[in-house]
Amino acid sequence: MIQPLNDTRNVIARAEKALTAGAITINQFVSLIEQAGIDLNKVAPEIDKASAVYARQFYNKRHLKDRYDYIVVGSGSSGAVVARRLAEDPDKQVLLLEAGGADDLPQILDPSVWYTNVGSTQDWNYATDPSPVVNGRSVLLTMGKAVGGGSSINASYWVQGKPSDFNFWAKQANDSRWGWDHVLGIYQRIEDYQGPFDPAFRGKGGLVWIEQPQNPNPLAEAIVRGAATQGIPSFNDNNGIMNHRPQGASLVNVRIKDGVRRNIPADYLYPILDQPNITLLTGAEVLRLTFSGKRATGVTLIWRNQPQTIYSDREVILSSGALNTPKLLQLSGIGEAASLQALGIDVVENLPGVGQHLQDHPVVAGCVWEHYENIPPRNNICEATFFAKSAPELEEADLQPFLAEIPYATEENARLAPLPQYGWSLGPGLNRTKSTGSVTLRSSDPRAAPRIDIPFLKHPDDLNALIRGVEICRAIGNSLPLKPFAKREVLPGPLKGKELEAFVRNGTITYRHEAGTARMGRDALSVVDAELNVYGVEGLRVADASIMPRITNGNPMAPCVIIGERLGEILNPVKQTK
């Protein structure tokens, strides 16, 4: 029997007081409510928001169903958005699966130590096979393994992407809704930008908090002035009008609020997790999809060390990232038929493009300067960036170096000179690569890491562009505006020819921006159509960076949100909210 309202409030108040004081666990909190005969669905508005979220999710996990309308695999920058947009319809039951754990860890919440997550338990720790293009090294391709995916461990940059990126996507998909004019409208709807506001390019009042670095390091502002000495104009917003110029330098837009990282779930997911129709399951590692003929029917997963199958009555949506999405597709029988058969995997659909066309943004670590004094890093430690051309004939920038307010270099390059105690770095990054790689299975074991063929430096133009990037960074780092911050250049110094080439090969790592392995398009190697349906099967879509026909010119978190929003428009064509 449901308790009278006054008694209900008293029970909730006492339970919340005990929970806040640490006298009871969330498990006991829910049990007290249930023992009192209180219907959690009806009293959730009476409960403090945070307690309601924890109580709701604990309750939903306790009463985990074997069927949902939609299953979303991956809670990152696309998956969290898709889950939010689906759950806005109260008639849809949504299950969101995340292989990693919670995102309330200090190393996630503190944006100034984001790099400490690389190689940690918050990282899938995938790596490329050793490759001669990086002098026999294996390069770590970091992917977030926590609620929020990459948005929980990245440098918090918000970069919209160039209009040319989305217009290229629209052409490949033959759908203008992927083009810049439509995408800009989405940005204007979802953004809550706190910086210098231009309504022609930015949004305010939406879900997504974006700000300029607060009290930025003077070194970051000097980098912007230094870029101007190399003909790279300065802007007060790395999006906005700068997005429409061939080159530009600025402080970066960051996803930080009150000094705390805002991953994508913070804005999209947590505000609705007290609803009864959405369940977030962490520690849920999906092993493969289930099929009935050509229709996806659900997923097989490991949760709490137990294998189980959960079914979807409508659709399964893969948002596992550009490394795990093609891995799951192949494990489930979708990929190049002969390769799957060789591993003993039954073929559901022969799609040879699955796992191909892997793209990434390589960056050289590192061009390092010694500082005169110890000025602790601020905000995300990477408060300035610039877009530059590696060759004057290019229509738009292909390079995106960034400032790191710490000295960093690969082990190989650090052998050339000891890194200083106090220092900073410029990372020459390449956004327009001509090389591609691949993600394929090593075995049919779902828990085995995939084989990853390195996606950069195989084309000589990539190497030449990064060499030019090093030269531009050296010129800026040694320019007059940086003199107060540069006691001396530590690396690379005036290397030329083969020595400079070796420095680039030994120093090339990745921005960790993997994309393109289930690309959208209409040719024989395309994997999804304009509405993100996987070709040849039913009830299965992909929504993450793997669908990018071409990786965006800039950090891909914001474009991944756009991918999630586009699928939200497709699945909920009428209701679109800020």
Image: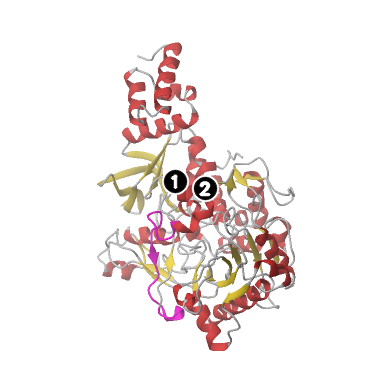
Apparent side of residue 264 relative to residue 237 in the rendered image (left or right)? left
Kindly tell me whether residue 333 is visible in this rendering: no
> Which amino acid type is shown beneath numbered disc 2?
Asn
Q: In this rendered view, identify the residue nearer to me: 496 or 525.
A: 496
User: Is residue 325 among the parts visible in the rendering?
Assistant: yes
The count of marks equals 2
Which mark, residue 263? 2
Quadrant of the snapshot with the C terminus: top right
Which residue range is magenta in the image? 117-136
Hey, which residue is sitting farthest front in the picture?
A: 373
**Residue placed most toward the observer, 114 or 465:** 114
- What is the number of the mark on residue 50? none
Asked if disc 2 and disc 1 are in contact, CB closer than 8 Å, the reply is yes
Tag 1: amino acid: Asp
- As measured in the structure, the alpha-carbon distance from the residue carrying label 2 to the one carrying label 1 is 9 Å
Q: Quadrant of residue 18?
A: top left
- Identify the residue at horizontal 31%, vertical 43% (top origin): 310
Which type of secondary structure does the marked residue at label 1 adopt? loop
Q: Earlier in the sequence, mark 2 or mark 1?
A: 1
- Where residue 359 appears, as percent x and y from the top left, is 50, 68
Residue 178 spot, x, y in % from top left: 60, 56
In the rendered structure, does residue 495 fall within the stretch colored magenta? no
Residue identifier under label 1: 103
Q: Residue at x 45, y 61 (%)?
A: 322
Q: Is residue 33 above or below residue 402?
A: above
**Residue closer to the observer: 184 or 387:** 387
